[in-house]
Amino acid sequence: MRFLTAGESHGPQLTVIVEGLPANMKVDIESLNNEMYKRQGGYGRGRRMQIEKDSVEIVSGVRHGYTLGSPITIVIKNDDFTHWRNIMGAAPISEQEEADMKRVITKPRPGHADLVGGLKYQHRDLRNVLERSSARETAARVAVGALCKQLLQQLDIDVYSRVVAIGGIHDASEYDIATIKEHVDTNDVRVVDETIAQQMRDKIDQAKQDGDSIGGVVQVIVDHMPVGIGSYVHYDRKLDGRIAQSIVGINAFKGVSFGEGFAAGDKLGSEIQDPILYDDTHGYYRASNHLGGLEGGMSNGMPLIVNGVMKPIPTLYRPLASVDINSKEPFKATIERSDSCAVPAASIVCEHAVTFEVARALLEEFESNNMSILKNQVDQRREMNINF
């Protein structure tokens, strides 16, 4: 399975083509749009989310609510394009129109792709860089992940996400899946512990008041995974390696870990490995899950625990120093609309990035032309863990 996204932040639409989903998979459009809505929420979001009301339109690959097995095309319209038509339109413009055009950007923002992208592609108007490098593209990735989540749900695999920390305030306790599912969407910072939610809001408000931004840590949990998804035989087939690459490919994500993650470096081997047990009901399982459900690049049947670290968003309302690429004079960096904190929304993006990689690995592992055949093979793998 693979996908390709296209579209600019203020262009007419985002377009996604997904290839490789099995035929006869049920697709629920309302559920897809609910996932899109979640990405737009969360405390600390900026004014862009008040303008765009993301919803998906499927224009190929699905008929009467079921996949055909052919490529699926998804369109996400940008409502704000009405105000950007003259700036972002595809039609050629005259030299005079180009000279008069507003919103030309020559002052690169620190922490963004602006300057490096301009150098690489030789763009003198850095809007040509920031329009595509914008986190707006993650709406398309959530749409893909939302499709894949429906695939996983039909295979009895559940995916959840939560916020673990914002601005140094932590909700780092371990919770069972039922507790996370019950609590995480009941507050706008997506933490399980309601007692610290207001502390996080206050921290976000302070950052906004100071013209600054804050980051945090998110966690994704994949439950009821069959054993042996991924492979140990080569580095690029390891499931944790693929997940890690996908997460750091999300805007502003700078770190990823599994299970206890970086804390494992402070512990003894006897404290971090997960003892193997067996019973007739569950088959092989682990007495603990320090390694986050992964051994040797493969799922071991325990819940996958994936942690992602998001840096503070680099667009600041108290901008840092920059240099105009035309005059070479120092300036304060250009300000685009931005969020003071996007960690709750980023947990949704991270959740769907992980969902895609898990779905892709499953479709590589088993025959995947037809949904019923795929489901039978996944069920057989689960039975194998008992009978082996």
Image (tube, rainbow, N blue to C red):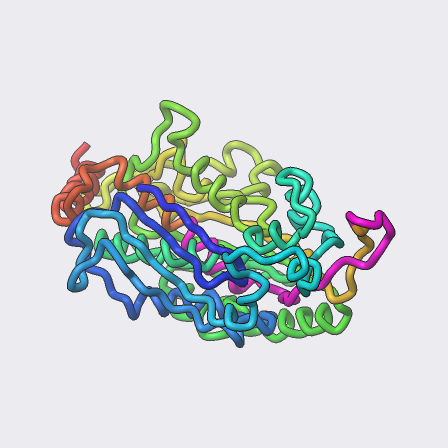
Front position in the image: 179 or 109:
109
Front position in the image: 175 or 236:
236
The magenta stretch spans residue 83: no
Front position in the image: 387 or 49:
49
Which residue reaches farthest right? Answer: 329
Q: Residue at x 58, y 41 (%)?
A: 262
Which residue reaches farthest top? Answer: 233
Q: Quadrant of the N terminus?
A: top left
Q: Residue at x 63, y 69 (%)?
A: 200
The range drawn in magenta is: 325-353
Q: Quadrant of the C terminus?
A: top left
Q: What number of labels is visible?
A: 0
**Residue 217 picture location, percent across and down:** 57, 55
Q: Is residue 350 left or right of residue 32?
A: right
Q: Residue at x 84, y 50 (%)?
A: 327
**Residue 134 picture location, percent across and down:** 57, 55
Mark yes or no: residue 27 visible.
Answer: yes
Mark yes or no: residue 193 visible.
Answer: no
In which image quadrant can residue 63 be found? bottom left
The magenta stretch spans residue 350: yes
In which image quadrant can residue 316 be found? bottom right
Q: Is residue 329 left or right of residue 194?
A: right
Q: Residue at x 58, y 44 (%)?
A: 255
**Residue 190 picture location, percent across and down:** 50, 67
**Residue 14 picture location, percent across and down:** 43, 58
Front position in the image: 376 or 81:
81
**Residue 86 in the image: above or below residue 123:** below
